[in-house]
Amino acid sequence: MDGPEPAATAVDCANDLMGVGFIGRASALGFDVPHDLSGTGFDGINLGGYVRPALTTVVTSPLELGQQAAKTLLRLVDRQSAGDHDIAPTRLLERHSLVRTSRRPPAHAPKRSGPEWLAFESSWC
């Protein structure tokens, strides 16, 4: 790739609680979420629907994940193969923290560099 790396336009957080924190911190830094910087979460907790903008998330089933993990663990305890790993069903819950756009951030997005921006990247998602 020639030239500088393109600026990020979205952050994919490991879970919804981090996504909620991302929205708060990005807004505090002057970003208009989702227009300057989009964000998503992963797990589908209710809290994501109460922040503004509401958090787009991948909804999972903790019950199904736990059941699959318990079955695998019991097979391993019985010295059996872990077997095939089923992928738990998920679904995208589109709310308002994510927009589909080009990779180029808007001209009015705040310019960030230095320690404050690095702290944002490492502390919030």
Image (tube, rainbow, N blue to C red):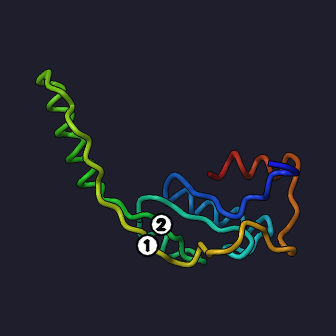
Q: Which residue is mark 2?
A: 57
Q: Residue at x 65, y 68 (%)?
A: 38
Q: Amino acid at mark 2?
A: Thr
Q: Nearer the viewer, residue 12 or 30?
A: 12
Q: Residue 8, image x and y in percent?
A: 73, 59
Badge 1 vs badge 2, beta-carbon distance below 8 Å: yes
User: In the picture provided, is 59 more to the left or to the right than 1?
Assistant: left
Q: Residue 120, image x and y in percent?
A: 74, 52
Give the residue furthest to the front: 2
Q: Amino acid at mark 1?
A: Leu
In the figure, residue 72 lies in which quadrant? Answer: top left
Q: Which residue is mark 1?
A: 93
Q: Residue 58, image x and y in percent?
A: 43, 63
Question: In terms of secondary structure, where does tag 2 sit?
Answer: strand
User: In the picture provided, is 36 more to the left or to the right than 45?
Assistant: right
Q: Residue at x 46, y 58 (%)?
A: 42
Q: Residue at x 51, y 61 (%)?
A: 41
User: In the picture provided, is 110 more to the left or to the right than 70?
Assistant: right
Give the residue furthest to the top: 79
Question: In terms of secondary structure, where does tag 1 sit?
Answer: strand
